[in-house]
Image (spheres, rainbow, N blue to C red):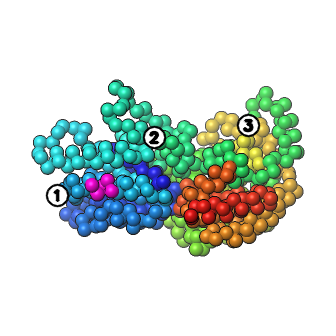
Amino acid sequence: MARRVLVTGGVRSGKSARAESWLAGDGDVVYLATLRADEADEELAGRIARHRARRPDDWRTVQVVGEAPPLPDALRAAGDEAAVLFDGLGAWLADRFDDLDAALDELDAFWRAAGHRRGGPVLVVAEEAGLGLLPSDGASRRWLDALGDARQRLAAEADEVELVVAGRVVPLPAGESASSSPAGEAAPLSPAGEAAPLSSAGEARPPTSGAAAEPWGGPHGAARPDPLRVHGDTAAGAAELDLAVNVHWSGPPEGLRTALVQALEGVDRYPDPASAAATMAARFGRDPSEVLITAGAVDALWLLAFAGGVRRACVVHPQFTEPEAALRTAGVPVHRLSRDPAAEWRLDPAGVPDDADLVVLGNPNNPTGTLDPPDVIASLCRPGRLTVVDEAFMDFVDEPGAGLAHVRDLPGLVVLRTVTKLWSIPGIRAGCLLGPSDLVTRLAAAHRPWPTGTLAHVALAWCAGDEAYRRTVAAEVATARDELQRGLTGIAGVVSWPSAANFVLLRVPHGEAVADALAARGIAVRRSTFPGLSRDHLRVAVRAPGTNRGFLDALSRAVVEAGA
């Protein structure tokens, strides 16, 4: 069943931005709007415009005030698969003021219908009115009573209830009435739950993620983590077959294992990345001054967000979500540029705003597997802009000239590389940033002391000299991937796209139900929390041919079960 979430808070508390960030990973979202612009009220018109500008362009907006259809009809029109955001309850009740009893009955019917949906979640944003004095006029008291009654009805059946106070989130236990709460106890402020504060430009920043919680809802009352901070390792859990984490299936090669064991002899000394930087510079034909050793690509992305001097960023979606999470946490306004599935997710440089001084994209892109031509990416580079290309999966591409790690003459080009994927060592955070020497110097000065350890340095050096193994693995993965994709074409309703990496993006009917059916068989796939994708999209890691064939059989059965 779809999850029902109540987000409540005072005026300018950040409640709407919190609800919007809650749905950041849902591709199809219907926004039920309860405010109408009034030419005579410039402040209200500006408020509506700011809210509209915050929302992704692909969200659908439906007015539910005035002569609009009843809420249950609007919910049915949205379709079962779409996520729905109803913002906000107080304005809607004011519009129904002539018959508040009928309005509450309509709201009850809407909430019951929401609980029977099979697809996306339904969120209601409600004003937390009534913390001050009782109004002196009867009309205000009637509206206030109706709003309080409505909030209690919604909270009684909601799967999650959140109170937003000054941009912070207090998760409230769902299903408990005020009379059942222990006297004098208050819900603790969740370290996970920061509501999305607004930047000076009015663009929402999603909350930072928190302590352990299930990525797609979790138990009733659990705080939902920021979708931008959910990754495949969380999805894998204790699954018997992990297709959610996209590292090579065979584990690290024996030679690398031996080198890492031998490196333990040197852990009694502080790590020095100089030799690793020299090795990676030689691998890519760079000067060591153009190489910064990092704890994987994520370390570099967060360093760029906080120390890159960025004023406005453009993130090309769907892609690995940590770049946007880092930028928004750093207070940087983010413009989302969406790839077009009809164009096989290829990059359209024309969509990048001229004033973006940072552009981030993946190549091959995660989760679509798209490999963009170097000249298309090069067209984004210009003085005054950093063009950051995450090439974490480029080692799987055995195509000369596909990557940009060797390129030194494009202004502002920054390339991120890592050895964790092909060599199967995600537990050793080992990667590097390749870029202009002045940028590397500035970022190194902002980096924390000893950000990478001896084992990472040894791993980078060993993998840099292991070209024969890299090419062997790239060829094995390409063969297994081609076989997997041929098998997918035989499953009714399943769509997949060409991939240059060690994973494949799928769209399946009833995606959540299919993922649940696979999980019941002990198979974990990467569900979508990627902006620009729907809950029908799943990412599947390429495994050995026999494993892939077993997965295809399980997927075929799961699709039939989900549609039954």
Identified at 55% across, 47% down, the residue is 215
Rounded to the nearest angstrom, the CA distance separating label 1 from label 3 is: 68 Å
Q: Residue at x 17, y 48 (%)?
A: 142
- In the image: residue 45, left or right of residue 419: left
The residue nearer to you, when weighing 138 against 274, is 138
Is the C-beta separation of discs 1 and 3 under 8 Å? no
Determine whether label 2 and label 3 are within 8 Å by CB: no
Residue 88 lies left or right of residue 323; in this view the side is left
Main secondary-structure element of the magenta-colored stretch: helix
From the image, which quarter does the C terminus lie in?
bottom right
Part of the protein shown in magenta: 105-109
The residue at the point 28 percent across, 48 percent down is: 150
Q: Which amino acid does label 3 sit on?
A: Gly
Q: Name the residue under label 2.
A: 221
Q: Depth-wise, is mark 1 or mark 3 nearer the camera? A: 1
Expressed as whole percent of the image width and height from the top left, the position of residue 559 reads 62, 63
Identify the element where label 3 is drawn.
loop
Element carrying mark 1 = helix
Residue lying at the far front in this picture: please name it.
564
Q: Would you name the residue on which mark 3 appears?
A: 453
Which residue, given by chain and number where applicable, does mark 1 sit on?
98
Residue 49 % position (x, y)? 33, 61
Amino acid at the residue labelled 1: Asp
Picture mark count: 3
